[in-house]
Amino acid sequence: MIGGASAMAVTAAVGLCYAIYKAVKWIHSLRQNYKTFERIGVAGPKPIFLLGNALEFMKKPKKMHEVHADLIKKYGRVTGLFMGVRGRYLLTDPDIIKEITVKQFSNFLNRSITFNTGFRFDLGLLILRDDHWKKVRNILTPNFTSNKMKNMRPLLDDSTRILMQKLDEATKTGEPVNIWEWFGTYTMQIIMATAFGTDVDSQTNSDNILNKRASQSLHLSPFAVISAVFLPALFPLMVRLDRSFINGMGFIDNFADKVLSMRKKEVDSKRQDIMQIMIDASDESKKGSLTHDEAVGQIITVLLAGYETTNNALGYIAYLLALHPEVQDKLINEIESAYNSTDSKEIDYDIIMYKMAYLDMVISESLRLYPPVMSIGREIKEDCVIKGVKFLKGLTIGIPAYAMHRDPEFWEEPEKFDPERFSEERKNSINTYAYLPFGIGPRACIGSRFALMEIKLCLVKVLMAYRFVTCPETQIPLQVKSAGSLSPQNGIYLKIEKR
């Protein structure tokens, strides 16, 4: 008969053997997982145990856009890599992209990264999945019309007036300014006015608590970002450890909730803004409305999705105009022609949105060189085959917009700033699925019309009175960094001159 001590030893030995068996089985399973792309004939860099291809990105920290371009160049238009243990297709084939984003969209509906912050931001269109996303998108889409955007235009006037005052001061001092930073506070003020229904001077009083908390909510710690990409299971924990983000997002979540609740009680409110769109969309007396929490989630999403992208776009356009004075001159001439034919110097929505072809060309070309979103991600719901490539359920897809926008197969002299690419004579030669500044298909950016209105209004107003000029502090070529978006690494320094 086995004694107590012996029985415990046997139990421990059995437990240890079982643990070793499970570990060996898990290691074997993981090794087989890393052979996935090899088995289906998709080329890519060899993964490292647990890390996958993380080292490819560590070699060029904050240069994910360059890593994507390097991988595509080396392995082809369909490249297989591993973000930790999860497989990811890197795609730059326009025909496959068309299938994924439009024709077979239902099989690639969800974004590839699932955020779980614990705040109502998780109910925003950026994060929602499956039927929940469809419900919210279907409710919101009819509300983001041209007429509603047009009605919001006056709300941008205060922000633009303050920006013009700052630019005027800059012409007097002659000092270079970080125009990217200035456009950031300008964009923040507009978002606060339109999405949060709050008139706050973000441009001259950036130390106010709302600005500080909003800024905190925009930036996750590097550990949280890395976990979201390579170890999604750890993401909720990394978020909870990021006190700055928690404080910022908690404040913004609560603030949006309170303002929305207060505005709902103001029966006679005439303010036409994004907040009002959310109030109308969450009208419980109507069938198929948003819940209050879903409406709060969309308001927060406008901040997180609309701030950095618009800020960056304005900064890059100013930079490119300063580098190419002949383009700036032509744009100024168009602005003068458009407004010399009117009796008012007020910025007219219909003119800037529909009657300034060269402005459209300049913006489109700037967004090609510096796309607001560096990469578009999708998740595969079911196995399928597209153009002979097998796409496996549960794996993800990355469409690197930056790499596609600078690919010589799709663009002649891709590094050259040439707005004429988007002229009436030439734009029909552009492959729609090789130009993705706001995404494409049903999951494209719902706020792109608002963003373009903001960009156009700012540029037209500024160029009516000033010019962007390079100076010794201007970085040429401009160094950029990338994670979720593409931002200037050291700001954008220019001089402002009166015309």
Image: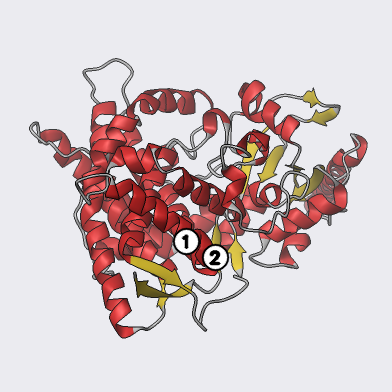
Q: Position of residue 143 (x, y in %)?
A: 33, 28
Mark 1 and mark 2 in contact (Cβ < 8 Å)? yes
Secondary structure under the numbered disc 2 in the rendered image:
loop
At 45% from the left edge and 74% from the top edge, which residue is drawn?
494
Q: Is residue 140 visible?
A: yes
Which image quarter is the N terminus in? Answer: top right
Q: Position of residue 67 (x, y in %)?
A: 74, 59
Secondary structure under the numbered disc 1 in the rendered image:
helix
Q: Residues within 10 Å of mark 2 (few under 14, many from 20)?
A: some
At 57% from the left edge and 29% from the top edge, which residue is drawn?
441
Here the colouring is: secondary structure
**Given the image, on which type of amino acid does mark 2 rest?**
His
**Relative horizontal placement of residue 423, taking residue 89 as reference (left or right):** left
Which image quarter is the C terminus in? Answer: bottom left
Q: Choose between 316 and 54: the one closer to the eye.
A: 316
**Relative horizontal placement of residue 80, taking residue 266 as reference (left or right):** right
Q: Choose between 440 and 26: the one closer to the eye.
A: 440
Q: Residue furthest top?
A: 287
Rendered view: 55 above or below 262: below
Cα distance between the residues tagged 2 and 1: 7 Å
Q: Quadrant of residue 55?
A: bottom right
Q: Position of residue 453 (x, y in %)?
A: 36, 44
At 53% from the left edge and 32% from the top edge, which residue is drawn?
443
Q: Residue furthest left?
A: 268
Q: Which residue is identified by label 1? A: 328
Rendered view: 124 above or below 479: above
Q: Is residue 44 visible?
A: no
**Given the image, on which type of amino acid does mark 1 rest?**
Gln
Q: Which residue is identified by label 2? A: 324
Q: Position of residue 475 (x, y in %)?
A: 57, 76
